[in-house]
Image (spheres, helix red, strand yellow):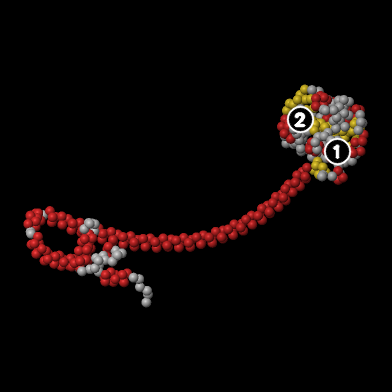
């Protein structure tokens, strides 16, 4: 896997070439600026290293605390003595903040806005005494022209970083300025190893084997890529995967659409069939309603006929009651009682003859017969005897067993004719 470089000038590539054999090493970054952009230590942190990040800009402190939880992150400036110092920030240009007043004047002369902020000042030796575990594998210093003051506050006889990486040009310039501070390094057992156009590399005399690894610039044999390219490739891979996923989802969506269309066609067919069934059921219900109306009409007509017959029977019954309650009927009661039986026998034959004629007259009139029979049926004890007498007067034989009471008064010939009429006829 290629090494991912985050540094501005491939400083981390050279340091990794020299120190990759060290597991979980320790670094100190003076002027760390950002935990990722132009960071010399980001690749080492990702490889399991940890260390001290020193950045006086207050706006970066929270970012370091969030992005580098294993590191010690100090929002201070480094100098020759403990105290405080004015930080000259350049909000429009990231990485140009400096504690050097001369650098700030140069920025103003170029039209760059400079904002002054008072920040704590610590010596690098004091920070090492407080936080360094023992071995410091590399120390990087990039403080925009203030490198000499930082080195004056460092005790290189006590604290022996294996490699020093120190910015050696004036801010935003190719002009070197290492002559102003190199005398604070080489007398303490450090030999010059390499200049990359921005930084000078020094190796402690105790580790001469590292000088060969720092002798040439970062090149293709280091197998590295910049983190911007790595992110671009990752985005491209993600986009390609997303496109493939989108294609797969599109194919799945097309299949689902085809399935949905098939289901829709099936649903439409079922709906058409259901509509046909609905129309058939609706027509059957309408036919049933029409038949029910005919039956209801017949029932209403029968009810009207029954009510009229009942009303007529009540009128006849009332007339009979009125006759029995009349004065003439009451006055003739004693006369009827005084009639001798023999006389009654002499009178009865003509009366019977008249009664027979009256019955024959009533029997030939269906409406009268229906009313009289209807009244007689209200008297269960009287009705059978009256029917027997009626059949005797008419000369009918007793009804056969199983003949309905409603047809008992008819002669057998009449019942036979009625049965023939009710029998269904086959079509000719």
Which of the two labelled residues, at mark 1 and mark 2, occupies the earlier sequence position?
A: 1
Residue 255 on image: x %, y %: 64, 57
- Please tell me which residue lies in front, 270 or 182: 270
Residue pushed farthest bottom?
Answer: 428
Secondary structure of residue under mark 2 = strand
Which residue is pictured at 31% across the width and 70% down the height?
419
Q: Is residue 86 left or right of residue 185?
A: left
Quadrant occupied by the C terminus: bottom left
Q: Which residue is mark 2?
A: 73
Residue 185 on image: x %, y %: 89, 29
- Please tell me which residue lies in front, 290 or 149: 290
Which mark is drawn over residue 20?
1
Residue 269 on image: x %, y %: 54, 61
Residue 44 on image: x %, y %: 81, 37
Q: Are marks 1 and 2 in contact (CB under 8 Å)?
A: no
Q: Is residue 112 left or right of residue 203?
A: left
Give me the C-alpha separation between circle 1 and circle 2: 24 Å
Q: Is residue 299 above or below residue 7?
A: below
How many numbered markers are drawn?
2
Of the two numbered discs 1 and 2 in the rendering, the one whose residue sits closer to the viewer: 1
The answer to which quarter of the image holds residue 170 is top right
Which residue is pictured at 46% across the width and 60% down the height?
278
Residue 68 appears in the rendering: yes
The answer to which quarter of the image holds residue 33 is top right
Residue 102 appears in the rendering: no
């Amino acid at each position: 896997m290629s090494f991912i470089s985050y540094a501005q000038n491939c400083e981390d590539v050279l340091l990794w070439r020299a120190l990759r054999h060290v597991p979980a090493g320790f670094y100190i970054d003076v002027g760390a600026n950002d935990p990722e952009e132009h960071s010399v230590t980001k690749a080492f942190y990702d490889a399991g290293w940890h260390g001290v990040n020193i950045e006086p800009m207050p706006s970066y402190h929270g970012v370091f605390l969030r992005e580098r939880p294993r590191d010690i992150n100090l929002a201070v400036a480094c100098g020759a003595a403990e105290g405080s110092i004015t930080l000259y920030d350049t909000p429009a240009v990231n990485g140009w903040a400096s504690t050097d007043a001369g650098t700030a004047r140069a920025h103003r002369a170029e039209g760059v806005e400079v904002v002054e902020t008072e920040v704590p000042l610590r010596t690098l030796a004091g920070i090492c005494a407080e936080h360094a575990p023992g071995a410091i594998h590399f120390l990087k210093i990039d403080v925009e022209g203030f490198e000499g003051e930082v080195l004056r506050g460092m005790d290189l006889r006590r604290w022996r970083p294996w490699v020093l990486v120190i910015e050696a040009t004036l801010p935003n310039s190719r002009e070197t300025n290492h002559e102003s501070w190199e005398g604070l390094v080489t007398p303490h057992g450090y030999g010059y190893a390499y200049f990359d156009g921005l930084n000078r590399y020094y190796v402690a005399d105790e580790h001469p084997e590292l000088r060969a690894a720092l002798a040439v610039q970062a090149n293709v044999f280091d197998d590295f890529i910049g983190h911007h390219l790595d992110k671009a490739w990752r985005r491209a891979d993600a986009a390609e995967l997303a496109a493939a996923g989108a294609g797969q989802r599109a194919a799945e969506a097309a299949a689902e659409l085809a399935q949905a269309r098939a289901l829709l066609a099936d649903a439409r067919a079922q709906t058409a069939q259901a509509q046909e069934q609905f129309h058939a059921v609706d027509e059957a219900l309408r036919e049933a309603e029409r038949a029910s109306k005919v039956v209801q009409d017949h029932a209403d007509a029968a009810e009207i006929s029954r009510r009229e017959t009942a009303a007529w029977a009540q009128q006849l019954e009332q007339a009979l009651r009125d006759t029995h309650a009349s004065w003439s009927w009451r006055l003739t009661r004693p006369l009827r009682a005084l009639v001798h039986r023999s006389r009654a026998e002499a009178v009865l034959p003509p009366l019977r003859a008249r009664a027979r004629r009256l019955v024959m007259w009533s029997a030939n009139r269906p409406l009268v017969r229906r009313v009289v029979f209807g009244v007689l049926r209200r008297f269960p004890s009287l009705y059978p005897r009256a029917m027997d007498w009626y059949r005797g007067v008419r000369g009918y034989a007793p009804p056969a067993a199983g003949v309905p009471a409603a047809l008992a008064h008819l002669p057998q010939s009449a019942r036979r004719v009625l049965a023939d009429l009710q029998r269904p006829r086959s079509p000719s």
